[in-house]
Image (cartoon, grey):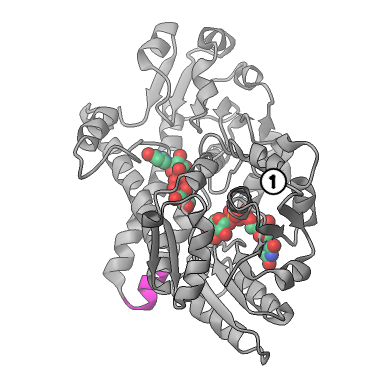
Amino acid sequence: MKITKICCIGAGYVGGPTMAVIALKNPTIKVTIVDINEERIAAWNGDDLSQLPVYEPGLAEIVEKTRDKNLFFSTNIDEAIDEAEMIFISVNTPTKTYGKGKGMAADLKYVELCARNIAKVATTDKIVVEKSTLPVRTAQAIKSILHNTGSDVNFHILSNPEFLAEGTAVQDLLDPDRVLIGGESSEAIESLANIYGAWVDDAQILRTNVWSSELSKLTANAFLAQRISSINAISELCEKTEADVNEVAKAIGMDSRIGPKFLNASIGFGGSCFQKDILNLVYIARSYNLSEVADYWEQVIILNDHQKRRFADHLISTLYNTVSGKKIALLGWAFKKDTNDTRESAAIYVSDHLLNEQAEIAVYDPKVNAHQVYADLNYLNTRPEKENEQLVSFMSDPYEAVKDAHAIAIMTEWDEFKTYDWEKIYHHMKKPAFIFDGRNILNKDEMTKIGFEYSSIGK
Ligand code: UDX
Ligand code: UDX
């Protein structure tokens, strides 16, 4: 099928950047991104490109080049569905918060709603592409909904999982390691392969069956997260044995079979994908009674929770076993640098633990705003919202955040933290001045020389 018009449902972290790059590389294809959230669409259409709903290096420039030429943002979902030959489903698939599979399984409510809407609106044949990360065999459910509409419209379902990482999304899209397309109809697969073929070498476009494609996405995220939990487990051992986790990571990373990437010990991984996808994998394994498989992957999450917890515990015990009434400055709230996304950020859980001990927290993050910080803490429902407001303050100046603090905890590896005037910061803090470097980004010797009591992960 020759594709001239694409519709993408979901203008989020995945849908926005992916469609912007597809539009950039395929100027003859009209790409329309739709969303039920009017505010979000208005922000994508806003004049100020620095205020797009998703911050990604390089994205604003692409949106500027393509918007209102062949890239459109709209809330008119039905019209965009009907005119497109290819529809991407890129809505969120959060972990279920209710009923069967609560806290584990993916909530497919939004995906199903999209499928039903497509079935209702479509008057011509469509290729429907699953872009959201989904449990294995979801395509079957979508297929069943689409094929039972009673109309003559034909639907082909493809799985095309996204491997972009936030903060480098544009780069990952422009130069992907691979593009994965799973499907039954080779004609439909080639229609999508042609779109990527505008800039991706054909050898990097993998064609598989639908189920392999769906499972590959979950497996890729599980393997990546597993590496972090593995090095974090070793970091705790390093702290007991005087080994240095950076040295261990370098030594093992030079083994070409292991490789150097994703071996940074940290306060624990965050982000919208890793925990959700592993929980999903665990849930699926349990549903087939594969308890050893489920337990194996669950351990990755258990270790990650432990890492966040022990960071907070270490901070409290170092501050003479109490943080009550003490100001702790948190540098960074995003789950990693170069993004404004805070979903599952370790900072949220570390803060929650410190707040339970009545700490006073001052937060600074270069891209996250105060509203998001309070929303993240309130979402946990640990204490009344009013108490979060009393105990947590948000500063737009990092030097204000650290003023009179007993300790600084580095939560995100933002580059700018390395360039601060640490002498000045030291002089404005309470003494002894503690730094807990949850990302191992500062130089221990330099910090100690200034006078800080410095501790990091795995050293
Ligand atoms: C994506 C993937 O789709 C998800 O499966 C993956 O695991 C994480 O990344 P993401 O783009 O990050 O999700 O989600 P989000 O930024 O929340 O965007 C989803 C958008 O879909 C939202 O703007 C939401 O308003 C929209 N939406 C949701 C609809 O338009 N219709 C719906 O029915 C539900
Ligand atoms: C991840 C996958 O990398 C991507 O392929 C998939 O499509 C979506 O999920 P993302 O969550 O955006 O991407 O970020 P990623 O760079 O993978 O980082 C996830 C978390 O792990 C962050 O909190 C990061 O700080 C942490 N991390 C990463 C470490 O703690 N140590 C590392 O060595 C690498």
Residue 407 visible in this rendered orientation of the protein: no
Ligand 1 lies in which image quarter?
Answer: bottom right
The residue shown at (44%, 69%) is 182
Q: Which of these two is toward me, 329 or 13?
A: 13
Q: Quadrant of residue 92?
A: bottom right
In the displayed structure, would residue 359 be above or below residue 428?
Answer: below
Residue 400 as seen in the image, left or right of residue 349: right
Q: Which of these two is toward me, 399 or 182?
A: 182
Residue 157 as seen in the image, left or right of residue 251: right
Residue 291 as seen in the image, left or right of residue 116: left
215 within the magenta span: no
Mark 1: amino acid: Thr
Dominant secondary structure, magenta:
helix
Crowding at mark 1 (Cα within 10 Å: few <14, some 14-19, many 20+): some
Residue beneath disc 1: 66
Image quadrant in which the N terminus is located: bottom right
In the displayed structure, would residue 320 be above or below residue 54?
Answer: above
Residue range corresponding to the magenta coloring: 283-289
The residue shown at (56%, 12%) is 425
Q: Quadrant of residue 218?
A: bottom left
The residue shown at (45%, 30%) is 315
285 within the magenta span: yes
Q: Which of these two is toward me, 415 or 388?
A: 415
